[in-house]
Image (spheres, rainbow, N blue to C red):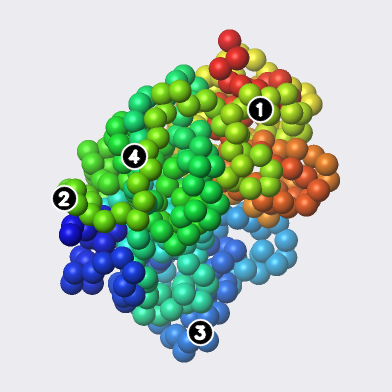
Amino acid sequence: MGATIIEKIFAMKCKKDVCAGEVVMAPVDNAMIHDITGPLAIQKFYEMGGKKVHSPERVTMLFDHQVPADSLEAANNHAYMRNFAKEQGIYNYDIREGVCHQVTMEMGKAAPGEIVVGADSHTCMYGAAGAFATGIGSTDMGFALKFGALYFRIPETIRVETTGSFQKRVGPKDLILSITADIGADGATYKAIEFTGETFETMDMPGRMTCCNMAIEMGAKAGIVPPDTITWDYIRHVRNVVPFSLESDSNASFIENRTYNVTNLSPQVAEPHNVDLGVDVTKVAGTKVDQVFIGSCTNGRYEDFAEAAEVLGNRKFSDNVRVIIIPASRQEYLKTLRAGLIERFVMAGALVEAPCCGPCMGGAFGLLAPGEVSLSTSNRNFKGRQGSTGASVYLCSPATAAASGIYGEITDPREVK
Protein backbone atom coordinates (compact mmCIF):
# COMPACT_ATOMS: atom_id res chain seq x y z
CA MET A 1 0.00 0.00 0.00
CA GLY A 2 1.28 3.45 -0.90
CA ALA A 3 1.57 6.45 1.41
CA THR A 4 -0.25 9.77 1.60
CA ILE A 5 1.71 13.00 1.51
CA ILE A 6 1.14 13.37 5.26
CA GLU A 7 2.51 9.90 5.97
CA LYS A 8 5.53 10.68 3.79
CA ILE A 9 6.30 13.88 5.69
CA PHE A 10 6.25 12.07 9.03
CA ALA A 11 8.27 9.18 7.61
CA MET A 12 10.95 11.63 6.48
CA LYS A 13 11.06 13.34 9.86
CA CYS A 14 10.95 10.15 11.92
CA LYS A 15 13.33 8.33 9.56
CA LYS A 16 11.14 5.25 9.41
CA ASP A 17 8.00 4.01 7.70
CA VAL A 18 4.84 5.21 9.43
CA CYS A 19 1.12 5.12 8.75
CA ALA A 20 -1.98 7.05 9.78
CA GLY A 21 -3.08 6.36 13.32
CA GLU A 22 0.41 5.88 14.72
CA VAL A 23 1.60 8.10 17.55
CA VAL A 24 5.13 9.36 16.99
CA MET A 25 7.57 11.83 18.44
CA ALA A 26 8.63 14.07 15.57
CA PRO A 27 11.03 17.03 15.39
CA VAL A 28 9.48 20.43 14.75
CA ASP A 29 10.95 22.63 12.02
CA ASN A 30 9.34 25.81 13.26
CA ALA A 31 7.16 26.89 16.17
CA MET A 32 5.12 30.09 16.08
CA ILE A 33 3.78 32.05 19.06
CA HIS A 34 1.91 35.35 19.18
CA ASP A 35 0.73 37.84 21.76
CA ILE A 36 -2.46 36.02 22.79
CA THR A 37 -1.26 32.43 23.23
CA GLY A 38 2.45 33.10 23.68
CA PRO A 39 2.48 34.17 27.34
CA LEU A 40 0.76 30.97 28.49
CA ALA A 41 3.07 28.82 26.32
CA ILE A 42 6.07 30.52 27.91
CA GLN A 43 4.65 29.90 31.38
CA LYS A 44 4.21 26.22 30.53
CA PHE A 45 7.80 26.11 29.28
CA TYR A 46 8.99 27.32 32.68
CA GLU A 47 6.62 25.01 34.58
CA MET A 48 8.20 22.06 32.74
CA GLY A 49 11.59 23.13 34.05
CA GLY A 50 12.59 24.86 30.84
CA LYS A 51 15.75 26.92 31.04
CA LYS A 52 16.79 27.27 27.42
CA VAL A 53 14.61 27.00 24.32
CA HIS A 54 15.69 24.00 22.26
CA SER A 55 16.23 25.88 18.98
CA PRO A 56 15.69 29.66 19.22
CA GLU A 57 16.25 30.03 15.48
CA ARG A 58 13.26 27.78 14.88
CA VAL A 59 10.85 29.92 16.90
CA THR A 60 8.80 32.64 15.22
CA MET A 61 7.48 35.29 17.59
CA LEU A 62 5.34 38.30 16.76
CA PHE A 63 2.40 40.35 18.00
CA ASP A 64 -0.70 40.70 15.85
CA HIS A 65 -3.93 40.23 17.79
CA GLN A 66 -3.83 43.32 20.02
CA VAL A 67 -1.46 45.78 18.37
CA PRO A 68 -0.44 48.32 19.24
CA ALA A 69 -1.28 47.31 22.80
CA ASP A 70 -4.87 48.39 23.43
CA SER A 71 -5.00 47.66 27.15
CA LEU A 72 -2.67 47.40 30.11
CA GLU A 73 -3.07 43.62 30.02
CA ALA A 74 -1.99 43.54 26.37
CA ALA A 75 0.97 45.80 27.11
CA ASN A 76 2.06 43.50 29.94
CA ASN A 77 1.80 40.46 27.66
CA HIS A 78 3.92 42.19 25.03
CA ALA A 79 6.56 43.16 27.60
CA TYR A 80 6.62 39.60 29.00
CA MET A 81 7.22 38.14 25.56
CA ARG A 82 9.84 40.75 24.64
CA ASN A 83 11.79 39.87 27.77
CA PHE A 84 11.54 36.15 26.97
CA ALA A 85 12.80 36.77 23.44
CA LYS A 86 15.85 38.66 24.76
CA GLU A 87 16.53 36.01 27.39
CA GLN A 88 16.32 33.15 24.88
CA GLY A 89 17.91 34.77 21.84
CA ILE A 90 14.68 34.54 19.82
CA TYR A 91 14.17 37.04 17.03
CA ASN A 92 10.93 38.90 17.71
CA TYR A 93 9.06 40.45 14.78
CA ASP A 94 7.08 42.38 17.41
CA ILE A 95 4.27 44.59 16.03
CA ARG A 96 6.07 45.51 12.82
CA GLU A 97 5.27 42.80 10.31
CA GLY A 98 1.59 41.82 10.57
CA VAL A 99 -0.54 38.73 11.06
CA CYS A 100 1.39 35.68 12.27
CA HIS A 101 0.36 33.27 9.50
CA GLN A 102 1.08 35.63 6.63
CA VAL A 103 4.42 36.62 8.12
CA THR A 104 5.42 33.00 8.73
CA MET A 105 4.87 32.28 5.05
CA GLU A 106 6.63 35.44 3.87
CA MET A 107 9.67 34.77 6.00
CA GLY A 108 10.08 31.25 4.63
CA LYS A 109 9.35 29.56 7.95
CA ALA A 110 7.35 26.79 6.27
CA ALA A 111 8.38 24.71 3.26
CA PRO A 112 7.48 21.40 1.59
CA GLY A 113 8.05 18.37 3.79
CA GLU A 114 8.41 20.31 7.02
CA ILE A 115 6.48 20.02 10.27
CA VAL A 116 5.39 23.40 11.60
CA VAL A 117 3.33 24.09 14.70
CA GLY A 118 1.75 27.26 15.95
CA ALA A 119 -0.13 28.26 19.06
CA ASP A 120 -3.04 29.30 16.87
CA SER A 121 -5.63 27.13 15.16
CA HIS A 122 -5.15 28.66 11.71
CA THR A 123 -1.54 27.53 11.54
CA CYS A 124 -2.86 24.99 9.03
CA MET A 125 -2.53 27.77 6.43
CA TYR A 126 1.11 26.79 5.89
CA GLY A 127 -0.10 23.63 4.18
CA ALA A 128 -0.22 25.85 1.10
CA ALA A 129 3.58 25.58 1.17
CA GLY A 130 3.44 21.78 1.22
CA ALA A 131 4.18 21.56 4.94
CA PHE A 132 2.36 19.60 7.62
CA ALA A 133 1.23 22.58 9.69
CA THR A 134 -1.11 22.45 12.64
CA GLY A 135 -2.29 24.50 15.57
CA ILE A 136 -1.48 23.31 19.08
CA GLY A 137 -2.36 24.33 22.62
CA SER A 138 -0.12 26.33 24.90
CA THR A 139 0.96 23.29 26.95
CA ASP A 140 2.05 21.47 23.79
CA MET A 141 3.83 24.62 22.67
CA GLY A 142 5.68 24.82 25.97
CA PHE A 143 6.84 21.24 25.34
CA ALA A 144 7.89 22.06 21.77
CA LEU A 145 9.86 25.09 22.97
CA LYS A 146 11.72 22.96 25.49
CA PHE A 147 12.36 19.83 23.44
CA GLY A 148 12.14 20.94 19.80
CA ALA A 149 9.80 18.03 19.12
CA LEU A 150 6.25 16.93 19.88
CA TYR A 151 4.08 13.85 19.99
CA PHE A 152 1.67 13.55 17.06
CA ARG A 153 -0.96 11.06 16.05
CA ILE A 154 -0.52 10.89 12.30
CA PRO A 155 -3.89 11.87 10.81
CA GLU A 156 -5.81 10.01 8.16
CA THR A 157 -6.42 11.99 4.99
CA ILE A 158 -9.53 13.15 3.19
CA ARG A 159 -8.68 13.73 -0.46
CA VAL A 160 -10.50 16.65 -2.07
CA GLU A 161 -10.29 16.71 -5.86
CA THR A 162 -11.44 19.81 -7.71
CA THR A 163 -12.18 20.37 -11.37
CA GLY A 164 -13.26 23.28 -13.55
CA SER A 165 -12.56 27.00 -13.64
CA PHE A 166 -14.16 29.75 -11.59
CA GLN A 167 -16.69 32.19 -13.00
CA LYS A 168 -15.81 35.87 -12.85
CA ARG A 169 -15.92 37.18 -9.26
CA VAL A 170 -16.00 33.68 -7.82
CA GLY A 171 -12.84 32.24 -6.29
CA PRO A 172 -11.03 30.24 -3.61
CA LYS A 173 -12.94 31.72 -0.65
CA ASP A 174 -16.23 30.70 -2.24
CA LEU A 175 -14.82 27.23 -2.87
CA ILE A 176 -13.64 26.66 0.69
CA LEU A 177 -16.93 27.96 2.13
CA SER A 178 -18.74 25.50 -0.14
CA ILE A 179 -16.48 22.61 0.85
CA THR A 180 -16.90 23.48 4.54
CA ALA A 181 -20.68 23.48 4.18
CA ASP A 182 -20.48 20.07 2.51
CA ILE A 183 -18.07 18.37 4.92
CA GLY A 184 -19.44 20.08 8.03
CA ALA A 185 -17.87 21.74 11.05
CA ASP A 186 -16.73 18.42 12.50
CA GLY A 187 -16.68 16.27 9.38
CA ALA A 188 -12.87 16.23 9.19
CA THR A 189 -12.03 16.12 12.89
CA TYR A 190 -8.38 15.14 13.37
CA LYS A 191 -8.05 14.38 9.68
CA ALA A 192 -5.82 16.02 7.11
CA ILE A 193 -7.41 17.45 3.98
CA GLU A 194 -5.37 17.14 0.79
CA PHE A 195 -6.48 19.64 -1.84
CA THR A 196 -5.86 18.36 -5.37
CA GLY A 197 -7.18 18.52 -8.92
CA GLU A 198 -7.00 20.92 -11.82
CA THR A 199 -8.56 23.84 -9.93
CA PHE A 200 -5.82 23.78 -7.31
CA GLU A 201 -3.14 23.08 -9.88
CA THR A 202 -3.89 26.44 -11.49
CA MET A 203 -4.68 28.28 -8.25
CA ASP A 204 -2.15 30.87 -7.07
CA MET A 205 -0.52 30.74 -3.64
CA PRO A 206 -2.83 33.34 -2.05
CA GLY A 207 -5.83 31.19 -3.03
CA ARG A 208 -4.18 28.06 -1.67
CA MET A 209 -3.45 29.87 1.58
CA THR A 210 -7.11 30.85 1.87
CA CYS A 211 -8.26 27.25 1.47
CA CYS A 212 -5.67 25.67 3.76
CA ASN A 213 -6.31 28.37 6.36
CA MET A 214 -9.90 27.21 6.76
CA ALA A 215 -9.25 23.46 6.99
CA ILE A 216 -9.60 23.82 10.76
CA GLU A 217 -13.18 25.02 10.26
CA MET A 218 -14.03 21.42 9.35
CA GLY A 219 -12.18 20.13 12.39
CA ALA A 220 -9.15 19.14 10.32
CA LYS A 221 -5.72 18.81 11.86
CA ALA A 222 -4.12 20.11 8.67
CA GLY A 223 -4.82 21.17 5.12
CA ILE A 224 -2.21 20.67 2.43
CA VAL A 225 -1.66 21.25 -1.27
CA PRO A 226 0.98 18.97 -2.83
CA PRO A 227 3.95 21.16 -3.82
CA ASP A 228 4.30 21.91 -7.52
CA THR A 229 5.95 24.54 -9.70
CA ILE A 230 3.69 27.25 -8.22
CA THR A 231 4.77 26.24 -4.71
CA TRP A 232 8.47 26.06 -5.50
CA ASP A 233 8.39 29.38 -7.34
CA TYR A 234 6.95 30.98 -4.20
CA ILE A 235 9.39 29.23 -1.87
CA ARG A 236 12.50 30.16 -3.85
CA HIS A 237 11.74 33.82 -3.25
CA VAL A 238 11.71 33.42 0.53
CA ARG A 239 14.41 30.80 1.22
CA ASN A 240 16.95 28.56 -0.43
CA VAL A 241 15.48 25.07 -0.81
CA VAL A 242 16.22 22.54 -3.52
CA PRO A 243 12.91 21.35 -5.08
CA PHE A 244 11.99 17.71 -4.70
CA SER A 245 8.98 15.52 -5.43
CA LEU A 246 6.40 15.17 -2.67
CA GLU A 247 2.94 13.79 -3.35
CA SER A 248 0.63 10.99 -2.31
CA ASP A 249 1.15 7.66 -4.02
CA SER A 250 -1.49 6.61 -6.53
CA ASN A 251 -2.34 3.63 -4.30
CA ALA A 252 -2.34 5.56 -1.04
CA SER A 253 -5.15 4.88 1.41
CA PHE A 254 -7.54 7.79 1.96
CA ILE A 255 -10.28 7.65 4.54
CA GLU A 256 -12.53 9.56 2.14
CA ASN A 257 -12.52 10.97 -1.38
CA ARG A 258 -14.60 13.99 -2.35
CA THR A 259 -14.91 15.76 -5.69
CA TYR A 260 -16.03 19.28 -6.50
CA ASN A 261 -16.57 21.02 -9.82
CA VAL A 262 -16.27 24.80 -9.53
CA THR A 263 -17.58 25.63 -13.00
CA ASN A 264 -21.07 26.52 -11.78
CA LEU A 265 -20.08 27.60 -8.27
CA SER A 266 -21.74 30.84 -7.17
CA PRO A 267 -20.48 33.33 -4.58
CA GLN A 268 -20.96 31.81 -1.13
CA VAL A 269 -21.87 33.34 2.22
CA ALA A 270 -21.67 31.57 5.58
CA GLU A 271 -24.61 32.54 7.76
CA PRO A 272 -24.36 33.09 11.52
CA HIS A 273 -23.22 31.51 13.74
CA ASN A 274 -21.14 28.75 12.17
CA VAL A 275 -18.73 28.50 9.26
CA ASP A 276 -20.41 25.43 7.75
CA LEU A 277 -23.68 27.31 7.19
CA GLY A 278 -22.63 28.34 3.71
CA VAL A 279 -25.32 29.25 1.18
CA ASP A 280 -25.51 30.80 -2.28
CA VAL A 281 -25.27 34.58 -1.97
CA THR A 282 -28.69 34.94 -3.59
CA LYS A 283 -30.28 33.34 -0.51
CA VAL A 284 -29.10 36.13 1.79
CA ALA A 285 -28.94 39.01 -0.69
CA GLY A 286 -30.61 42.12 0.68
CA THR A 287 -29.55 41.52 4.28
CA LYS A 288 -28.55 44.89 5.74
CA VAL A 289 -25.00 45.16 7.05
CA ASP A 290 -23.48 47.64 9.48
CA GLN A 291 -19.84 46.73 8.97
CA VAL A 292 -17.73 45.16 6.24
CA PHE A 293 -14.28 43.80 7.08
CA ILE A 294 -11.83 42.93 4.31
CA GLY A 295 -8.64 41.43 5.69
CA SER A 296 -7.34 38.72 8.09
CA CYS A 297 -4.93 35.85 7.49
CA THR A 298 -7.62 34.33 5.27
CA ASN A 299 -8.10 37.21 2.82
CA GLY A 300 -5.72 40.05 3.64
CA ARG A 301 -3.36 39.77 0.69
CA TYR A 302 -2.85 42.14 -2.23
CA GLU A 303 -4.77 39.79 -4.55
CA ASP A 304 -7.79 40.02 -2.23
CA PHE A 305 -7.71 43.82 -2.28
CA ALA A 306 -7.30 43.86 -6.05
CA GLU A 307 -10.39 41.65 -6.27
CA ALA A 308 -12.32 44.06 -4.04
CA ALA A 309 -11.06 47.09 -5.97
CA GLU A 310 -12.16 45.59 -9.29
CA VAL A 311 -15.71 45.36 -7.96
CA LEU A 312 -15.58 48.80 -6.35
CA GLY A 313 -14.39 50.60 -9.47
CA ASN A 314 -14.85 54.35 -9.07
CA ARG A 315 -17.80 54.01 -6.72
CA LYS A 316 -17.98 54.88 -3.04
CA PHE A 317 -18.98 52.71 -0.15
CA SER A 318 -22.37 53.32 1.43
CA ASP A 319 -22.45 55.93 4.18
CA ASN A 320 -24.48 53.44 6.20
CA VAL A 321 -21.62 50.92 6.37
CA ARG A 322 -18.32 50.99 8.23
CA VAL A 323 -15.81 49.45 5.82
CA ILE A 324 -12.58 48.34 7.51
CA ILE A 325 -9.67 47.20 5.36
CA ILE A 326 -6.55 45.63 6.89
CA PRO A 327 -3.66 44.12 4.92
CA ALA A 328 -2.30 40.94 6.50
CA SER A 329 1.31 42.09 6.56
CA ARG A 330 3.61 45.01 5.92
CA GLN A 331 4.62 43.46 2.61
CA GLU A 332 1.00 43.12 1.52
CA TYR A 333 0.24 46.64 2.71
CA LEU A 334 3.08 48.02 0.58
CA LYS A 335 1.98 46.06 -2.49
CA THR A 336 -1.53 47.42 -2.08
CA LEU A 337 -0.26 50.93 -1.41
CA ARG A 338 2.03 51.00 -4.45
CA ALA A 339 -0.81 49.80 -6.67
CA GLY A 340 -2.84 52.83 -5.61
CA LEU A 341 -5.55 50.75 -3.95
CA ILE A 342 -5.15 52.18 -0.45
CA GLU A 343 -5.94 55.66 -1.75
CA ARG A 344 -8.87 54.32 -3.73
CA PHE A 345 -10.34 52.62 -0.66
CA VAL A 346 -9.86 55.68 1.53
CA MET A 347 -11.46 57.93 -1.09
CA ALA A 348 -14.35 55.47 -1.23
CA GLY A 349 -14.92 55.91 2.51
CA ALA A 350 -13.06 52.94 3.97
CA LEU A 351 -10.92 52.96 7.08
CA VAL A 352 -7.54 51.35 6.28
CA GLU A 353 -5.60 50.07 9.27
CA ALA A 354 -2.01 48.91 9.79
CA PRO A 355 -1.39 45.14 9.42
CA CYS A 356 -2.95 43.17 12.29
CA CYS A 357 -5.83 40.81 13.07
CA GLY A 358 -8.22 43.70 13.68
CA PRO A 359 -11.90 42.75 14.13
CA CYS A 360 -11.31 39.08 13.28
CA MET A 361 -11.33 37.83 16.88
CA GLY A 362 -12.88 40.93 18.42
CA GLY A 363 -9.80 41.53 20.54
CA ALA A 364 -8.78 45.05 19.62
CA PHE A 365 -11.08 47.27 17.54
CA GLY A 366 -13.97 47.17 15.10
CA LEU A 367 -16.30 45.53 17.61
CA LEU A 368 -19.99 45.08 16.95
CA ALA A 369 -22.82 46.31 19.15
CA PRO A 370 -25.87 44.15 19.96
CA GLY A 371 -28.08 43.76 16.91
CA GLU A 372 -25.40 44.82 14.43
CA VAL A 373 -24.42 42.79 11.38
CA SER A 374 -20.92 42.29 9.99
CA LEU A 375 -19.93 40.86 6.64
CA SER A 376 -16.35 39.64 6.86
CA THR A 377 -13.69 37.97 4.75
CA SER A 378 -12.20 36.39 7.86
CA ASN A 379 -12.52 32.75 8.87
CA ARG A 380 -14.98 32.51 11.76
CA ASN A 381 -18.44 33.82 12.49
CA PHE A 382 -19.10 32.30 15.92
CA LYS A 383 -21.43 34.16 18.26
CA GLY A 384 -19.49 36.97 19.93
CA ARG A 385 -16.53 36.56 17.56
CA GLN A 386 -16.43 40.22 16.59
CA GLY A 387 -17.94 41.81 19.66
CA SER A 388 -21.40 41.46 21.18
CA THR A 389 -22.99 38.01 21.42
CA GLY A 390 -26.09 39.81 20.20
CA ALA A 391 -24.42 40.67 16.89
CA SER A 392 -24.29 38.56 13.72
CA VAL A 393 -21.32 37.82 11.46
CA TYR A 394 -21.55 36.57 7.88
CA LEU A 395 -18.47 35.33 5.99
CA CYS A 396 -17.74 35.89 2.31
CA SER A 397 -15.12 36.61 -0.36
CA PRO A 398 -13.47 40.00 -0.95
CA ALA A 399 -15.58 40.49 -4.09
CA THR A 400 -18.83 39.92 -2.20
CA ALA A 401 -17.62 42.13 0.65
CA ALA A 402 -16.85 45.02 -1.72
CA ALA A 403 -20.17 44.72 -3.53
CA SER A 404 -22.03 44.68 -0.23
CA GLY A 405 -20.07 47.67 1.06
CA ILE A 406 -21.27 49.67 -1.93
CA TYR A 407 -24.96 49.00 -1.39
CA GLY A 408 -25.10 48.54 2.37
CA GLU A 409 -26.58 45.06 2.07
CA ILE A 410 -25.34 41.63 1.08
CA THR A 411 -24.97 41.77 -2.69
CA ASP A 412 -24.02 39.30 -5.39
CA PRO A 413 -20.78 40.76 -6.83
CA ARG A 414 -21.76 39.50 -10.28
CA GLU A 415 -24.62 42.01 -10.20
CA VAL A 416 -22.29 44.99 -9.88
CA LYS A 417 -21.73 46.30 -13.41
Local crowd size for mark 3, using a 10 Å CA cut-off: few (<14), some (14–19), many (≥20) = some
Residue at (27% x, 37% y) in the render: 230
Question: Could you say which disc has been placed on residue 161 in the image?
Answer: 4
Q: Nearer the viewer, mark 3 or mark 1?
A: 1
Image coordinates for residue 178, horizontal then vertical, percent: 51, 37
Q: Is residue 241 visible?
A: no
Q: Are marks 3 and 1 in contact (CB under 8 Å)?
A: no
Question: Could you say which disc has been placed on residue 46 in the image?
Answer: 3
**Mark 2 residue type:** Phe
The first of marks 3 and 1 along the sequence is 3
Q: Quadrant of the C terminus?
A: top right
Where disc 2 sits, the SS reads loop
In depth, the one of 241 and 26 nearer the eye is: 26
Residue under label 1: 283
Residue under label 2: 244
Question: Could you say which disc has been placed on residue 307 in the image?
Answer: none
Q: Give residue 263's quadrant in the image.
A: top left
Q: Is residue 125 visible?
A: yes
In depth, the one of 20 and 13 nearer the eye is: 20
Image coordinates for residue 134, horizontal then vertical, percent: 42, 60
Q: Nearer the viewer, mark 4 or mark 2?
A: 4
Kindly give the residue lying farthest to the bottom in the view shown: 49
The first of marks 2 and 3 along the sequence is 3
Is residue 158 positioned above or below 270 on the image? below
The first of marks 4 and 2 along the sequence is 4
Image coordinates for residue 177, horizontal then vertical, percent: 52, 39
Q: Nearer the viewer, mark 2 or mark 1?
A: 1
Horizontal side, residue 353 vs residue 327: left or right: right
Horizontal side, residue 48 vs residue 54: left or right: right
Q: CA distance from mark 2 to mark 3?
A: 39 Å
